[in-house]
Amino acid sequence: MSLKGLFNARWPGVALFDLDGTLVDSAPDLAAAVDQMLEHLSRPAAGINKVRQWVGNGAAILVRRALADSIDWEPVDAKNDALFNDAMAIFYHAYTQLNGRHSVVYDGVEDCLAHLAEQGCRMAVVTNKPEQFVAPLLEHMGLEHWFDLTIGGDTLTVKKPDPAPLLHAMEALKGTPGTTVMVGDSAADINAALAAGIPCVAVRYGYNYGPPVDSLGADTVVDSLAELL
């Protein structure tokens, strides 16, 4: 289904996009930063395959998963605040140096963004990535000019799957639930859209873990954003 088909033969007035795993494959840089952090703490490297499963709920959860070497970090989390704080500082320093170095824009993204812009659609990035890393990554990828607004995981007091970041972006761009769409790759994106009462498109190529993305309740699921045109 095209985006036009979701809105009674009209294109959406506002489109909200997740970043990591939806617009950009940033896992190589995130994995490198995680492994630098683990090496500094004299722990085994995680590697990109694990990190791809751990991304999506913000930097703090990514670091906790890396320290626990598990997606289900809470049962094995040592609650060692000093260790966690040290790990976060090391990760932030490493990722600041790496952000965008090995990342790539997914096929179909530029075509989709260009077409939506031609239709007068206002666009925002709504991500759980810390805000300080969002603009540099978009600029490095050459995507910053498409977006009127960016919302990071620490822009508000809550992040996805809470609907507040979506609602905040929608209202800032003068959208309504009937004219706005969320595009993401994970349960956090889909659940946030469902809670916000707006349509959701999910991509299969991202970083979702657990049940297949097709089973999570999105209005449509695609292999490329080009399919939405």
Image (tube, rainbow, N blue to C red):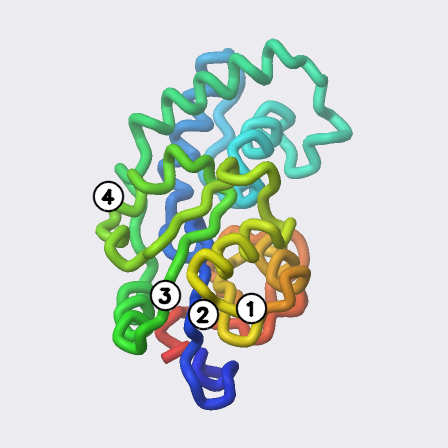
Residue under the image location 45 percent in, 90 percent down = 9
Q: Is residue 176 shown above or below 84?
A: below
Q: Earlier in the sequence, mark 4 or mark 3?
A: 3
Determine which of the numbered discs, if any, sits on residue 124 in the image. Answer: none
Residue that mark 3 sits on: 122
Q: From the image, state whether disc 4 or disc 3 is nearer to you.
A: 3
Q: From the image, state whether disc 4 or disc 2 is nearer to you.
A: 4
Tag 4 and tag 3, C-beta contact below 8 Å: no
Residue under the image location 56 percent in, 68 percent down = 200
Q: Quadrant of the C terminus?
A: bottom left
Q: Amino acid at mark 3?
A: Arg
Q: Is residue 110 shown above or below 72?
A: below
Residue that mark 4 sits on: 140
Q: Is residue 71 shown above or below 196?
A: above
Q: Amino acid at mark 4?
A: His
Q: Earlier in the sequence, mark 1 or mark 4?
A: 4
Give SS at disc 4: helix
Compute the Cα span from label 1 to label 4: 27 Å
Residue that mark 1 sits on: 200
Q: Is residue 165 visible?
A: yes
Residue that mark 2 sits on: 223
Q: Residues within 10 Å of mark 3 (few under 14, many from 20)?
A: many
Q: Residues within 10 Å of mark 2 (few under 14, many from 20)?
A: some
Compute the Cα span from label 3 to label 2: 23 Å
